[in-house]
Every structure is written in structure tokens, then in C-alpha cells.
């Protein structure tokens, strides 16, 4: 069944140009503002996108028996079989993540009504909604033609209703037939396609290529994709079109089920194909992180998210009095301080004042011994107390992007402490403080990541990943070596001194495992959510070090179509195809 949605054309001169072109050619070509480059002075080349989701295709499973058309497509593709769906792998939620460019933690969509739910912390406020990519395109580029062919009515009627044309199909073969008809008769710039038979086979007998019906369904869909690709090449204007073909899956599966957040349920694949692309497998790794923010819910301040160590009495591993040397390395990303809540002091900045955000000291009072990271406007201060005297070292933090902060704390004498702060492996500040009693720098306070109610004068909002604590003072070169180390650091030369390592990948109950056996885990409280991003390190990981997630398709489509996203859309996806422009940009 077909649905047409005629969008109002707001620029009269653009309509005139469109009519003029229509009189000379079979296809409706958009005005020059959306064109890419000229060829032989006769006709312009137009960028177009075909997005196909093979719902329920598990990346590592289909890799085992990849059918011929997908195999052939890899030769001109950037691809991965280790892509990741969002943490909620329900059908509606996973499609929402792909089509909105934000994760489930923000859009909160659970069902095919696609109606956002109110914030539990602010139940009387209007729920935040995230429009689909088609709504955004219709708004900022109304002459861009879009179409959807799907097996799910709610995609057409609700999530993707802003398309110029939508088509329902009862079978995957019907989807294929309709897409080919569109390619032969219409001139869409973006076409979104859904196949579902692989998902149906997985539900019936298992999401595995050992399930014959699963493999058969995959092979049939592969044949349909081959038919569609042939139809693209048969278009009369194909020589003047530059197609990006994106093929992926909305989620994976385990056994014969899906909907959870296990790796198998989240494992998908992604192929980005264009005739000019050189074959490259995307090898980026996932970096898990947790967003820590807020307060303890008292005094009309919102209940935030923080993590506290389970072993409250463990004072030996992370106390300077025991080790005499500590190297603490943490990956941070600080967010604008009113992203969720209004800052007390300087709203809409990266400044945070007088808040402990990480350490083994529950209070900044000189009388309480221990160590902590303490915010000081645009800086982070490492503060150490023996119960009488404070030693501190302060350096600027990096705002709005991931960076690695490493602190080296050394008892260079029984009464003297040296502190060094390294940002991305470069020394940022160093201090030496005398008059300390090293033996008193110990506490039974737990390790805390996030706010401390007694000292959070300002409300924190930051992301944290890959926390390491060593009982050795490392040199700058050693710091650079381990923050760029790509293997299992526990098995490296650093492993013997590694006493704490938290990847910040929480379980469903909020436990953050200490990767060092026998050492203290952390426990999250509040409305926490485990998230992932393509690994970020202060070293060259190469162009192919890209980890693809469901939120990344939106930004790739906008990039390819040369449309500008807006900061206030709060998109979470990365752009990575621009790394390969030397391959496809014409001179």
C-alpha cells in the first residue's frame, strides 16, 4: 500500500528550476544547491543514499556464511561485523536509535507508538522528543526526495511518517519489488528499506546460521539486494548519480529471542558501499562508559548517578601510606554543566566548582585523610590530606571531548609528597609539598566515582571510562606507553602493578567489575545507563579504527548528502566517512 505526503515547497524560484529541468529529462532533479560536482559541463552528479536494514541479522553469525551479493559488495566498502545496536534491542527502540541518531538512554522509546515517556525525575514536564532523520530533512531541505518501503506499518505511520512516500509490503519479496519499481520510475534522494524474514526465522528457530531457515532467509534477502543493486545501475541517470549503499541490521539475537542488552543481541553489522571506496574492514573497539551527574536528591536537587566501591574497609590497595606510589589514569569527558540540570554558579559552561568527583576521601575537610579529584572552575585539582595538611596540584581539564588524565602521586620522603598531572600523556602541572605525614594518608572511606553530597557545591556532569590505579609511580614515557597500549594490559609489563581496573561497563544491576581478581568492584546508584563509543586514545589508531553503532547511520547519511546537522539536535553519532574523502571526492 502506498502513502503520499506532499511537503510544502517554500522557495518559488527553486520550483521554477525544478520545472525547467523536468521538461528536459525523465527524472526530477533537485536545484543546484544540493548538487555535488560537475561532469563534462553537461549535467551534475547527485549524491543519493539507499539504507537497507536486514532486521535480526547477527553480525558474527552472517559473517560465517556471508552470501554472494553482500560478499561482492565488500570489495568497494567500509564494513564491520562487530557493529553494535543500542542497549534496548526491541524492534521499535532499535529503529528509533537508527533513525533519530540518539540512544535509548535519551529517546526512551519502548514500543511502536513512538511516543516519548516523561522523565521520571520531572514527571510533570513535557517529554523530550527526538524527530526522525526524515523529519529533519523535510525541514531543512524540503526539495530532497525521500521514500520508505517497510514490512512494519508503524515505521511508515509514525516514526518515518515525514517521508514523501511510504509503502507497506507483506513479504520481503514485496519489499524488493516495490523498491525496484521506485528506482525505475521515481527519483528519490534517500530510500529506507526494511527486510524482516531473517528476523522471523531467528524468532522461530534461532539467530544462528546453524538454523537452516535463518540461512535460507538471509540468502533470499541477499538475492533481493542483488536485484536492487542491479536496478540502481540500470537507471538512465546512473552515470550522474553517486550512491552510498548502507546495509545493516536493527539488532541481533540470542537463542530465539532478542530485546535485551547481551553482546549477541546487540551485535550487528554495517556495510557502507560506494564504487569509489577501497575495501577496508573497520577495526575500532568499543569503549564503555558511564555518565555520572547530579546530587543525592535532597534540597530539591535531582537524584544523580554515582558509583561506590563495595569493599568499604579496604584501605590498603589505594592508600598512599601503603604503596608510597600511585599512578591513577582515567578517561574523562566533561559535559556542559546544564545538560540535565542547572549549575549553581556558571550555567551553560564547562566550569564546575568545589565538587569531589573521584577518589578515596568522602570529604574535602583537611581533617579527613585520603585523596580525591576536586573541581575548580575549568581545572581539576588533585587533593591529598594526612588529616592535618593538604597537598594539591591543579591543571586545566579538557572540555567537551574525551581525554586521558593521569596523576602520579609519590611519597618522595616521609614528610614530602610530589604530585604530577598529565593530560593525554603530556605533563600539565607538578607540585611538591613538605610537612606531610605519609603514614597518615589512609582511610576506610570507599572509592567514589561521581558526586559527594557533603561537598558537591556545584552539580557535576561528566562521562568516565577505563579507570586504572597502579601502585607504582610511572614516568611520562611509561604513561604514554600504557594509555596507548592495545592489548590486555593485565598481561603486559604494567600488569604486576595494576591494582584497580574498571572498564565502566555495568551489569543490569549496576555492578562495575574490577578486572583485577579479588579487588573491589563498584556499585552504581541512580538512573544509570551503560553506554559505548568508538575507542578514543591520545595516539594514532589509524583511519579504520572505527566502532560503528546504531546512532552513527544518521550522521553518515547527512554527511553524504551534504546536509548540516545542528548542535541543538543533540545527536550522538560520529562521522567517519570523511576520513576517506581522498578515495571518492572528484578533482
Image: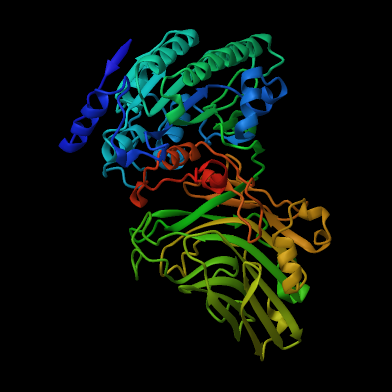
> Where, by quadrant of the figure, is residue 154 drawn?
top left
Q: Where residue 298 sits in the image (x, y, percent)?
A: 38, 59
Rendered location of residue 496, percent (x, y): 83, 61
Q: Residue furthest bottom?
A: 435
Q: Is residue 365 above or below residue 224?
A: below
Where's residue 513, x and y in %?
A: 67, 49
Give the answer, above or below, for where 384 lies relative to 544. below
Q: Say left or right for 44 vs 486.
A: left
User: Camera-side residue: 78 or 294?
Assistant: 78
* The quarter of the displayed image where residue 29 is located: top left
Report the residue at 19% width, 31% height from top.
8
Q: Tell whether 317 sits left or right of 398.
A: right
Residue drawn at x 65%, y 54% is: 310
Q: Is residue 442 visible?
A: no
In front of the other: 539 or 232: 232
Q: Residue at x 61, y 82 (%)?
A: 387
Q: Is residue 372 visible?
A: yes
Q: Residue at x 28, y 23 (%)?
A: 24
The answer to which of 523 and 11 lies nearer the viewer is: 11
Residue nearer the viewer, 397 or 363: 397
Location of residue 484 with respect to 59 vertically, above or below:
below
Amino acid at each position: 500500500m502506498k502513502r503520499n505526503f506532499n511537503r510544502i515547497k517554500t522557495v518559488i524560484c527553486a520550483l521554477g528550476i525544478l520545472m525547467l529541468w523536468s521538461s528536459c529529462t525523465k527524472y526530477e532533479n533537485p536545484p543546484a544547491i544540493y548538487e555535488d560536482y560537475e561532469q563534462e559541463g553537461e549535467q551534475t552528479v547527485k549524491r543519493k543514499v539507499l539504507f537497507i536494514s536486514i532486521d535480526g541479522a547477527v553480525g558474527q553469525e552472517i559473517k560465517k556464511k556471508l552470501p554472494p551479493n553482500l560478499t561482492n559488495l565488500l570489495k568497494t566498502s567500509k564494513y564491520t561485523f562487530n557493529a553494535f545496536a543500542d542497549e534496548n534491542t526491541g524492534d521499535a527502540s532499535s529503529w528509533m536509535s537508527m533513525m533519530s541518531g540518539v540512544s535509548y538512554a535519551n529517546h526512551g522509546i519502548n514500543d511502536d507508538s513512538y511516543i516519548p515517556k516523561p522523565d521520571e525525575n520531572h514527571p510533570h514536564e513535557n517529554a523530550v522528543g527526538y524527530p526522525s532523520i526524515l523529519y529533519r530533512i523535510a525541514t531543512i531541505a524540503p526539495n530532497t526526495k525521500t521514500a520508505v518501503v517497510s514490512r512494519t506499518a508503524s515505521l511508515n505511520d509514525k516514526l518515518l511518517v515525514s517521508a514523501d512516500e511510504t509503502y507497506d509490503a507483506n513479504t520481503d519479496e514485496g519489499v524488493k519489488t516495490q523498491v525496484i519499481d521506485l528506482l525505475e520510475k521515481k527519483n528519490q534522494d534517500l530510500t529506507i528499506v526494511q527486510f524482516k524474514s531473517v528476523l522471523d526465522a531467528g524468532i522461530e528457530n534461532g539467530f544462528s546460521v546453524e538454523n537452516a531457515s535463518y540461512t535460507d532467509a538471509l540468502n533470499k534477502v541477499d538475492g533481493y539486494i542483488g536485484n536492487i543493486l542491479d536496478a540502481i545501475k540500470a537507471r538512465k541517470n546512473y552515470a550522474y548519480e553517486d550512491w552510498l549503499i548502507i546495509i545493516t541490521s536493527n539488532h541481533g539475537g540470542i537463542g530465539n529471542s532478542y530485546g535485551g542488552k547481551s553482546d549477541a543481541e546487540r551485535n550487528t553489522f554495517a556495510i557502507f558501499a560506494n564504487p569509489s571506496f577501497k575495501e577496508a574492514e573497520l577495526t575500532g573497539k568499543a569503549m564503555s562508559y558511564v555518565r555520572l551527574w547530579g546530587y543525592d536528591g535532597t534540597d530539591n536537587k535531582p537524584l544523580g548517578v554515582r558509583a561506590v566501591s563495595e569493599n568499604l574497609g579496604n584501605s590498603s590497595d589505594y592508600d598512599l601510606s601503603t604503596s608510597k606510589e600511585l599512578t591513577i589514569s582515567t578517561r574523562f569527558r566533561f559535559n556542559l554543566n546544564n545538560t540535565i540540570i542547572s549549575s549553581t554558579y556558571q550555567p551553560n559552561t564547562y566550569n564546575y566548582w568545589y565538587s569531589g568527583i573521584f577518589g578515596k576521601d568522602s570529604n574535602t575537610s583537611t581533617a579527613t585523610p585520603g585523596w580525591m579529584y576536586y573541581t575548580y572552575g575549568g581545572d581539576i585539582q588533585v587533593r591529598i590530606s594526612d588529616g592535618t595538611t593538604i597537598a594539591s596540584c591543579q591543571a586545566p581539564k579538557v572540555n567537551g571531548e574525551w581525554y586521558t588524565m593521569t596523576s602520579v602521586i609519590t611519597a618522595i620522603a616521609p614528610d614530602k609528597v610530589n604530585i604530577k598531572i598529565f593530560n593525554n600523556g603530556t605533563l600539565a602541572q607538578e607540585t611538591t609539598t613538605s610537612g606531610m605525614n605519609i603514614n597518615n594518608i589512609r582511610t576506610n572511606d570507599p572509592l567514589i566515582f561521581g558526586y559527594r553530597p557533603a561537598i558537591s557545591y556545584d552539580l557535576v556532569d561528566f562521562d568516565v571510562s577505563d579507570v586504572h590505579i597502579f601502585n607504582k609511580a610511572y614516568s611520562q614515557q611509561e604513561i604514554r606507553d600504557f594509555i596507548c597500549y592495545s592489548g590486555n594490559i593485565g598481561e603486559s609489563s604494567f600488569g604486576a602493578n595494576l591494582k584497580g581496573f574498571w572498564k565502566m561497563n555495568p551489569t543490569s544491576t549496576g555492578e562495575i567489575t574490577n578486572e583485577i581478581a579479588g579487588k573491589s568492584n563498584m556499585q552504581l546508584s541512580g538512573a544509570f545507563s551503560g553506554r559505548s563509543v568508538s575507542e578514543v586514545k591520545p595516539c594514532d589508531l589509524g583511519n579504520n579504527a572505527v566502532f560503528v553503532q546504531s546512532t552513527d547511520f544518521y550522521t553518515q547519511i547527512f554527511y553524504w548528502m551534504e546536509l548540516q546537522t545542528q548542535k541543538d539536535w543533540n545527536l550522538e553519532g560520529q562521522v567517519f566517512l570523511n576520513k576517506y574523502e581522498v578515495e571518492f571526492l572528484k578533482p
